[in-house]
Amino acid sequence: MVPRSSLQRLHARAMLSRLLRPPWSDPPDEMRRALLVLAENFVHSHREEIETLATVLDERRSLPRAEIEEIFGSAGQ
């Protein structure tokens, strides 16, 4: 489930805040679901950059960190 509506995005943010809030007393299945939503959201949000990176890596088999940062721009900041 990729969060697309504002309500889904709000739910994903709430799950993220629960994930980052210690202690990690939530049930393991709930934690897995939260991580799955976060991963799906990241892939959905950065699909073009991921595809570009995969294409370049497939062609060259390696890539300097500076080029990876150029592909993703400020995504990690």
Image (cartoon, rainbow, N blue to C red):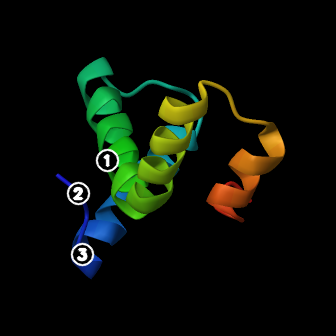
Q: Are marks 3 and 2 in contact (CB under 8 Å)?
A: no
Q: Secondary structure at mark 1?
A: helix
Residue located beneath label 2 in the image: 2
Q: Residue 73, position in %: x, y?
A: 70, 64
| Amino acid type indicated by mark 1 | Glu
| Amino acid type indicated by mark 3 | Leu
Q: Nearer the viewer, residue 41 or 32?
A: 41
Q: Residue 29, position in %: x, y?
A: 24, 23
Report the residue at 73% width, 59% height from top: 70
Instruction: Count residues near mark 3 (Cα–Cα under 10 Å), then give few for <14, some for 14-19, many for 20+.
Output: few
Q: Are marks 1 and 2 in contact (CB under 8 Å)?
A: yes
Q: Residue 69, position in %: x, y?
A: 74, 52
Numbered mark located on residue 7 in the image: 3
Numbered mark located on residue 40 in the image: 1
Q: Are marks 3 and 1 in contact (CB under 8 Å)?
A: no
Q: Secondary structure at mark 2?
A: loop
**Distance Cα–Cα, label 1 vs label 2:** 6 Å
Instruction: Please identify the quadrant where the C terminus is shown.
Output: bottom right
**Distance Cα–Cα, label 3 vs label 2:** 12 Å
**Distance Cα–Cα, label 3 vs label 1:** 16 Å
